[in-house]
Image (cartoon, rainbow, N blue to C red):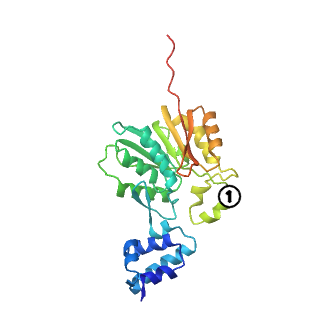
Amino acid sequence: MITAGHWLSECGLDRIDALALMRELADIPHARLLAHPEFTLDAVTTARLDAAAARLRTGIPLAYVLGWREFHGLRFAVSPAVLVPRPDTELLVEFARRHLASTHPARVLDLGTGSGAVAVSIADARPRAEVWALDASLDALAQAGDNARTLLDPSRPGGVLKLRHGDWFAALGADAPRFDLIVGNPPYIGAHDPHLDALRYEPALALVGARPCDDGLADLRHIITAAPRHLLPGAWLALEHGYDQATAVRDLLNVAGLDAVHSVRDLAGIERISAGRLSPPTSAAR
């Protein structure tokens, strides 16, 4: 048997990842480890930690090793079937909170829902909202449905998520309603982006999409072009995009006829989401 402090120093991991494994798999929080590094690990716990550390050293994301990721204050189950939720994507939830009144019902559509992190977080923050979530992956939809059932109150006025499978708006069907807000974190990484190797354990469909292209904008173009037909007058479309794509996405939103087009910066000051509004109809002159 070895001590917790010895395992921590010899595991070959970044300290933050090693501490997370110690907390989640050995039930030893950081404060206890600092106070008692001599705490002895039993053989079963050591084996569990070693196996998890070996997976991390291959590049598998910590969220997949643990099976969950926190997002907007909620713990979402995640697997290699879905993209690991990132803190920057919480901007979409905050956008929804600002543009949806808590006391009024609304319809929201989350495009490419993955784990359901955005859709469930919006539904949690706005219980009266009816939230639709679509994805091209059936495995992702199953994960989103499980998270919705685990994290949402089944008695919420807006009901549980309305899950739809298919290629963007084609998943909705001809009788689908128009929406008060459409949000999404679609694939936006270029087909030959050098960062893809570091993301090799995450689903390619969520990264480069079914329409891979050099600039990563194919799905964003498709969504923005089609979105006005699915928005109510005065409703917003808000989409996450790459760190260097804000200008291109704003141009697409303007070409699609949306107004009040603008971008929102993340905590690092990067323009991370861009949004536009479908103009309300103008009153006829008397």
Farthest residue toward the bottom?
Answer: 1
Q: Residue at x 57, y 66 (%)?
A: 201
Measuring from the top left, give residue 211's x and y in whole percent: 64, 51
Q: Residue at x 40, y 72 (%)?
A: 30
Q: Nearer the viewer, residue 285 or 227?
A: 285
Q: Nearer the viewer, residue 21 or 3?
A: 3
Q: Residue at x 37, y 80 (%)?
A: 36
Measuring from the top left, give residue 228's x and y in whole percent: 55, 35
Q: Residue at x 37, y 47 (%)?
A: 125
- Please determine whether, in this image, residue 60 is positioned above or below residue 241: below
State which quarter of the image contains the N terminus: bottom left
Q: Nearer the viewer, residue 103 or 38?
A: 38
Measuring from the top left, give residue 140's x and y in whole percent: 49, 58
Residue 29 in view, yes or no: no
Question: Amino acid type of disc 1?
Answer: Asp
- Please determine whether, in this image, residue 228 is positioned above or below residue 112: above
Category of crowding for the residue at label 1, using alpha-carbon neighbours closer than 10 angstroms: few (below 14), some (14–19), many (at least 20): few
Answer with the quarter of the image where residue 59 lies: bottom right
Answer with the quarter of the image where residue 3 lies: bottom left
Q: Secondary structure at mark 1?
A: loop
Measuring from the top left, give residue 232's x and y in whole percent: 48, 32
Report the residue marked by disc 1: 193
Farthest residue toward the top?
Answer: 286
Answer with the quarter of the image where residue 47 lies: bottom left
- Please determine whether, in this image, residue 163 is positioned above or below residue 179: below
Answer left or right for 234 relative to 274.
Answer: left
Residue 23 in view, yes or no: yes
Q: Nearer the viewer, residue 163 or 187?
A: 187
